[in-house]
Image (cartoon, rainbow, N blue to C red):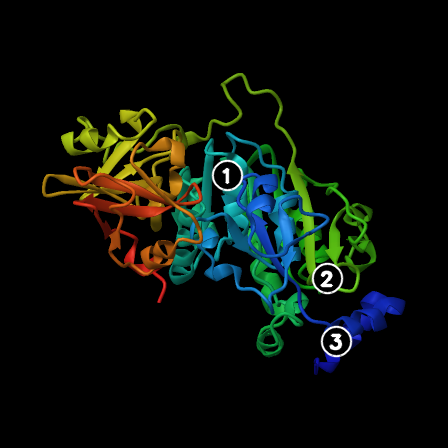
Amino acid sequence: MKLPVSFEEKMKRLLKEEFDAYMDCYKKPRFYGLRVNTRKISVEAFQEICPFPITPIPWIENGFYYDGAAVSPGKHPYYAAGLYYLQEPSAMTPANRLPVVPGERVLDLCAAPGGKATELGAKLKGEGLLVANDISSSRAKGLLKNLELFGIGNLLVLSEEPGRLAQYFPEYFDKILIDAPCSGEGMFRKDKKMVRAWEEHGPDYFSKIQKHILLQAAAMLRPGGRILYSTCTFDERENEQAIEFLLQECPEFSIQAIMPYDGFAEGIPQLSNTQMEDLKKTVRIFPHRLDGEGHYLALLQKREKAFDLSGSPRKSGSLAQKSQRGRVREVPEELISFWKDVNWELSQDRLEIHGEKVYYMPSEVPDLSGARFLRTGLLLGDWKKRRFEPSQAFAMYLKKEDYQKILDFSRADERVRKYLKGETLEVSDLVSPSEKGWYLICVDGYSLGWGKLSGGTLKNKYLAGWRLS
């Protein structure tokens, strides 16, 4: 592979005696990985049912390698059920190393296509709030699909510039992940097109963007909260020097140790302008040291403020008030009728109706008037013409035990693929002729979508935009 001369010279300076080993990695094939969605299935249960060979990624407890030349996991029904996400192994590290616990407010600031956000959402286990943002509205649409596929309901999906986002969320979040736009040097082996992109927009271009993003994120983090900053590049201007910049501008931040792994390398203080010793706590990932591509990670904590007698440290000005727009005074009869088959209690104060759309909101949502958002909460479905039609997102959110009317197919049943293609199904062998209504369609116990049953025939309600071609 032909690499730019200036890039090779930089890597020689960076790696010294390890440079030849690094260059040898370009002669080897890239690695393929998948990450198990622990919101839907345990790692152990997935290993038991996985239909193709997988090998554990040693530093990611729910990550596995697979042979991308031999199998296509993205075409399997388990992918359509949201049981895993396909992701380059090293790219799993940032969300894995950000310590998120259920109930927290978490922001993925540069979230598309969703590899990190889906893991953060799974870690929250349906509690707290996940805000997933991407400045590109087209990329944010793909982000939303992946979050829906994973069954994440306690979410907001926005498409805002970080500076504008900071106006809505001052000192609001417990944890923030910044997978920053970067020059992509760590991905050269995986994607040769990244070399051309690097030649057009290199480290100097991206370092300015990264510094701006870091400052906006700092303003949105509550005292005591943590930021995980990551890039997929090697250049110090985007890595150690970016962190050095934040610490100089925001001295209330400090660098925290990241859970180690033998294949990780320390950050290099000598590459910063002040040779800040704490930069050793940051992590560099090189493709010749482990089976993955190149990355950089830094974990930062914001200092707690002195005890405030005015109240909770989470209180954040105008955000103490929730938006009342769309709040439901009376639950529609059609939704009540549908809910008789749902095995969990509907909380009216979390319902919102906007036009025909019915949403189930997270328990804590600030007023987002004027913000560009693609989704607020879980889309339950459409209420129109005196009927309620459940959404694809709601199907993916539900577990088999959450709903009473189930059609559960084995992955070997040809009707699974027909369903995913949008075809009408004959199911008279599974139900009596008198049964009718909305059924949750599952594969081996995991939800795929909806179907409407009548006379032993299932009308396909799988979302048109998700169907197999």
Relative depth, front residue between 347 and 365: 347
Relative depth, front residue between 203 and 48: 48
Q: Mark 2 or mark 3, which has the lower sequence index? A: 3
The location of residue 176, given as percent across then percent down, is: 56, 43
Q: Which residue is mark 3?
A: 27
One can see residue 83 in this view: yes
Please name the residue shown 30% across and 26% down the image. Answer: 346
- Position of residue 230 relative to residue 430, above or below, is below
- Around disc 3, counting alpha carbons within 10 Å, would you say few (fewer than 14), some (14 to 19), or many (20 or more)? few
Please name the residue shown 82% across and 47% down the image. Answer: 277
Per the model, the C-alpha gap separating discs 1 and 3 is 37 Å
Inspect the image, locate mark 2, and give the three-letter code of the amino acid beneath it.
Glu
Which of the 4 image quarters holds residue 223? top right
Inspect the image, locate mark 1, and give the three-letter code of the amino acid beneath it.
Arg
**Label 1 element class:** loop
User: Given this view, does label 2 or label 1 mark the residue nearer the observer?
Assistant: 1
Please name the residue shown 27% across and 26% down the image. Answer: 348
Inspect the image, locate mark 3, and give the three-letter code of the amino acid beneath it.
Lys
Specify the label residue 39 is tagged with: 1
Q: Quadrant of the N terminus?
A: bottom right
**Label 2 element class:** loop
The location of residue 37, given as percent across then percent down, is: 53, 44
- Tell whether 357 sits left or right of 202: left
- Around disc 1, counting alpha carbons within 10 Å, would you say few (fewer than 14), some (14 to 19), or many (20 or more)? many
- Position of residue 160 relative to residue 219, above or below, is below
